[in-house]
Amino acid sequence: MAAPLAGTGAPPEVAARTPGAEASARAPFKRRLAARAQEVLAPVVSLIHRAGVRADHLTVLGLLLCAGAGLAFFDGHSRLGALLLLGAGLCDLLDGQLARRAGGETRFGAFFDSTLDRLGESLVLLGILGFCLRNLVALVFESPRVLEQMAVGLYPVTWAVVGGTAALALVASFMVSYTRARAEGLGLECRVGWFERPERMMLLILAGALKVFWAMSGALLLLTVLSFFTAAQRVAYVWKHTRGAGLDR
């Protein structure tokens, strides 16, 4: 019989199946990438810490940049939107590091950061949805524009479908966050699923930078599918460690 691991009282094969061990084993690449990013950004964090900037300031700045990105996407300036979204992502990387540098993350700080992240991402997707709806409405009142867009393959139904996909992407992104938050509210560390906010933002940044209609359409579809898949992974994970394990009584 295998000897228990020190401090766990459980055999190695049991300890390896714990929720935290399973979750951490599935994202080694993301952990290495995050660690590398922290190393690169460490001098920047030191600089802004000495300047008196707080983590909450960066969190609010990230929200403002997301709001600006949403407006840029709504107005059809996708490359500007991508640039602003990139800035928001940088703020998201820096605020956690800055909080740790200043003495550690607080519970309210973590809550505040997550809340504004959800709001910022919603504003970006609403901006993309608004752009689709704006073009759809314009086609109703500008008949010549209908023929021009149909000549390049953009039918009115195309704008409706892409707008609907943007709305589904918004729902899917919330589902990824909600399933994890609800699982952790039940006492489970639910870190399964790799397609989270950074991946969603990078997909929109790339699509916006390309400034090609079909690139953004494909990005929205991919974002929706992968986000719902990640949420489903988390539902399956919670089932496995509650009802599936015979613990749901």
Image (tube, helix red, strand yellow):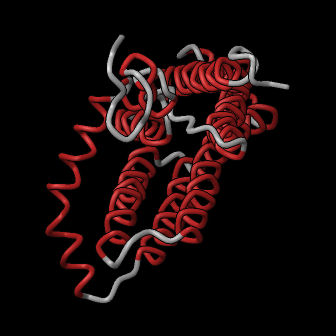
Q: Which of the 4 quarters of the picture holds residue 31? A: top left
Kindly identify the residue that appears in the image at 71 percent across and 14 percent down. 244
Observer-nearest of 220 and 11? 11
Does residue 67 show up?
yes
Observer-nearest of 30 and 160? 30
Does residue 131 show up?
no
Most extreme residue toward the right, as rendered?
249
Kindly identify the residue that appears in the image at 81 percent across and 32 percent down. 140
Residue 231 screen position, x and y as percent: 63, 26
Most extreme residue toward the top, as rendered?
1
Residue 185 vertical position relative to residue 188 in the rendered view, above or below: below
Q: Is residue 18 left or right of residue 16?
A: right
Kindly identify the residue that appears in the image at 39 percent across and 53 percent down. 89
Q: Which of the 4 quarters of the picture holds residue 141? A: top right
Quadrant housing the N terminus:
top left
Q: Is residue 58 left or right of residue 172?
A: left
Residue 157 screen position, x and y as percent: 74, 18
Residue 219 screen position, x and y as percent: 49, 26
Residue 39 vertical position relative to residue 232 in the rendered view, above or below: below
Quadrant housing the C terminus:
top right
Observer-nearest of 198 and 215? 198
Q: How many marks?
A: 0
Q: Is residue 70 left or right of residue 178?
A: left
Kindly identify the residue that appears in the image at 26 percent across and 79 percent down. 48
Residue 73 screen position, x and y as percent: 54, 47
